[in-house]
Image (cartoon, coloured by chain):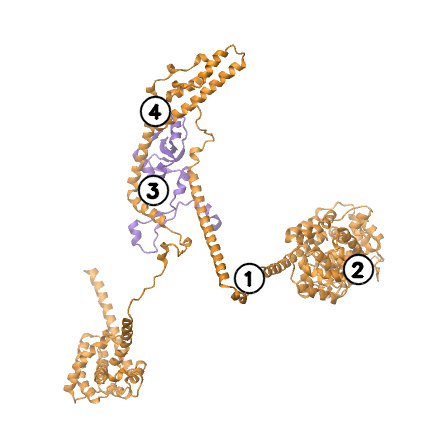
Chain colours: A purple, B orange
Amino acid sequence: MRPLTDEETKAMFEKLSKYIGENIKLLVDRPDGTYCFRLHHDRVYYMSEKILKLATNFSRDKLISVGTCFGKFTKTQKFRLHITALDFLAPYAKGFGVAAKTTQECRRVDPLSIVVFHQADVGEFIRNEDTLT
Amino acid sequence: MLKYDPSKYSHNIRKLDRDDADRSTPVSQLTWQVEGGDDDISRKRRGEFPSYEPRRPKKSRPLGADTCKAPDRKRSEQKNSSDLIQSKRFSIGPTRTDAQGDLDSDEEICRLMAAQDSSHHALQQEAEESPLEVVGLEYSVKSGRKGDEDEYDSADTDELIASRRNLSPLSNERSKGRSQPGEEKVKAVLPLQTLSFKEDSGLEKKRTKTRVLPVLQHGDEEEEEEEESAGSSSDSEYEAMFSNVTRLELSLADLQRLAEEDSQAAGILGSEGDPALAAGPSEQPAPKKGTSPEEILAAILEDSDDDRPRKRKKRKGVTLPPLPAFQGTRSLQETDDLLRREEEEGGGDQMDSRTTETEGQEGEKNGALSQSPVASESSSSSEEDEEERTTETPAAEALLPSQIFSDEGSGEAAPPTLRRKLNAEEEEELQRKANLRRLSALQQRQKKVEEQKKLIQGALANLDAPPPKAGKRIVFDSDDEEENPSQTASSIIQSVEEAAGTRAVANQRAAKDKFSAPQLFDSSEDEDGAEEEENRFDLRPQFEGQAGQKLMALQYRFGTDERFRMDERFLEEEEPDGEAESGLAVEDEALEEEKKKNLSILQNLLGSSKQPSSRTPSKAAKFRDVSTLHYDPSREEHTAFETKTIQTTESKAARRKKREEAQKLPEVSSDIFYEVSGDLKAVFGQTKEELSEAEEENNWDQEEEEEDGGEEEELQTSLLPDDPITTKEESSGFKFSFFGVDGETSSRETTEYKVENIQAPKVSWQQDPRFHDSSSDEEPESQSREAKAEEPPSTMDLFFFYPGDSRLKDGPTLFCRSGQLEEQREDWEERRTMLRREVRKKHKDARRKLKAAPKS
């Protein structure tokens, strides 16, 4: 278990910011305790310092998981967010949508063009099951 | 059965039934039939009442249904009961034959029999219980019957009353032979009457028959809904069978008696000693207590009277007073006894079904009382019962609230006249109260909103809360000696204090141990103990501090053994402790550093996007829900919401001036445009010059507009003398000619003057400067202006009209056509063509530009 390097941290924050924007700050800097990210077997775990200190007592191969797993880094160092992070992201979620055009473009484009891709909303089926079918 | 006719289904029932006697009944045939002995109770349960000797014109009852079953046979012993049964079965039987052939399955027959039995059973019950009336479709019809008191009214009391009141509507609804109240009363059919609630699918023919007929058929239909074809093929048989209707009356009388007995026992129907007699007095309370059991009973007693007109009168009397308020549980409790009695005999299910459906206890009461009936048969009828009840209860309830409302403070429901009489004070009070209410409602709303917000916040906050405390381990305040080694510097002091506390505790513990020791054992060490007691609570400095804590823990391990007392020699050295602590601090610092680093990375990532987002939260914070916003005049901030009326501080003189100016304008314009000049010569003289000018202008115009030269001609033609002049001369009296030679010089001067004057119309609102190219318009105007100027203005000052007033001339011109219609049309045509030309020109120019631009 080791802390994240700068690049890794940056990659992870980038990913998180897509979902919760700048509220990552609230995850990093919490009033009720010190929480941190740690990397273990290519997975990023989010835990409080207390857990962290306890976890240091385990040997690496014996430690399976610590705190909550936010995601993992792939072989090519891309950060994949896991569903186990949902509880932490949900309160700050920004909604579903990927901008299809740049901000400047969005301003200039005609009213009918597609600006946001409403994708990756897997829960929509569950949330709206009453109305969809 | 006198004659056995194998072709008749009813005759075969008995036969078949014999075969099925030993069969175990399948589920579909479960009935309410009570197998019993010969004792009075079981007999009564089956519907076999002791002989009453009713007057019976006929005793013939061909049905051998009596002997279908053993109990039936017993019944046949008693004429009354047997007749009852016969009639009942009879009713059911023939209808079945109507619907089906003789090939009915045994099961159905058994069901029928069972139904009959149950109906009898119900009848028995009814007879025994209070004489509530079973309200069937023929309830209204029943009214004419006597002995109706024995018929339990399964409907709600409200329905009772309503049915009494509304004979015709109800009869229409139910499409039954209610219309004949004077018919014979077939009270034995009581239970079956409930069946009548069901829709009559078509036994219209039976209407003319006694009430029993339709009812019974109803019941039968219910049973055989799928099968029955509503045929009345064997009407004759049915009628023949039902010629014994009167017998039932007698039995009802018997029931009456029973009912009376019951009533006396229950103590409710005290007033109904003799149904016939008590009908009168009982009716009086009846109308008032529409929903009470007494009322129902009274209704029944009423029905017992054959006197229809009296009944109708009663009904009328009933209709007049509004429904009284529900009597309440008191009256109910009185009927509880009856209910219980009935329950014992078993209409439990029905009662439940009815109670659940009907509102309030009234229905319950009625349902219980009218249990009845007819188990399977009336099951569906009970539905109708309930329906009716429910339909009528709202009516009754509607009446009730209206009553209550009327009874309540008339001040609130006061008609306008009363209102006026209210003082202003009272109105103020009302307003104040209303205001208070409004405020309180507002506050409540606010509270709700806040609560919701808090809920949301709490819910969100709790999302992250559990993880730290995920463990089930309960952490107590560290009263322990074992202090968590990972403490920051700040907590060291705490730990020290705690250590002191724990030390004291440990000392106490030790002391206790010590103390107990001497007690346990005979003290040969009292002296030592005494000494130790003194020293027990002294401060022990070796236990102070972090190291002291450890020492204490160590001491604790060794217990109170004197040999293992920890003193300062055992204290660890401070330095390593300090190092450990510093190490802990370092760790924490590292975490803090990491945090800061993360934040910095974050900032780098989101630096640019952060700013707008920082704005948005502020905007979001500023977002105010407009719906919650409520204008409060007492608050200073809300003065912004008020619309400010602009106070005109103009003086009166200024206002007057404004007015005058406003007035002036039309006058001026009229001067300009609509003045008629009488000076023909001047007009003519001027026209010549103007013509030349016009021509020049036209030429210039022509040069400008190359495309439509022809249209230019129009302009010229308009200026040309002949037609326009003549037309103009004719119409408006504007007289001028383009060829006026005389007075040219003067006209020149005047033209100059006119030129100046011409400017104004170009600018004025009546003239569109862009298209004012026709000098034809100019001439008259200029001339008119000139003429006007010449006229003396003195006359304008007078207020009153006088003959020759210019205003009289000017006024009509305001709304009359100023020029010749043709003139105007031509002018318009010119303008139009001009416009078109212009527009096309511009369009082409723009196109050319566009083409030119990309090319270049």
Q: Which residue is mark 1?
A: B411
Number of the label disc, if any, that sits on residue A22? 3
Assess disc 3: are there few (<14), some (14-19) or many (≥20) residues with their C-alpha within 10 Å of its C-alpha: many
Q: CA distance from mark 3 to mark 4?
A: 35 Å
Same chain under badges 4 and 2? The reply is yes
Q: In the rendered view, tell whether residue A81 sits above or below residue B853.
A: above
Q: In the rendered view, tell whether residue B768 sits above or below residue A95.
A: below
Q: CA distance from mark 3 to mark 1?
A: 63 Å
Q: Residue at x 47, y 53 (%)?
A: B441
Q: Chain letter of disc 4?
A: B
Q: In this rendering, would B171 be left or right of B784?
A: right
Quadrant position of residue B677:
bottom left
Assess disc 4: are there few (<14), some (14-19) or many (≥20) residues with their C-alpha within 10 Å of its C-alpha: some
Amino acid under disc 1: Gly
Q: Residue at x 47, y 18 (%)?
A: B511
Q: Nearer the viewer, residue B280 or B849?
A: B280
Q: Which residue is mark 4?
A: B581
Q: Position of residue B438 (x, y in %)?
A: 47, 55
Same chain under badges 2 and 3? The reply is no
Q: Nearer the viewer, residue B238 or B402?
A: B402
Q: Which residue is mark 2?
A: B249
Q: In the rendered view, tell whether residue B11 sits above or below residue A73.
A: below
Quadrant position of residue B229:
bottom right
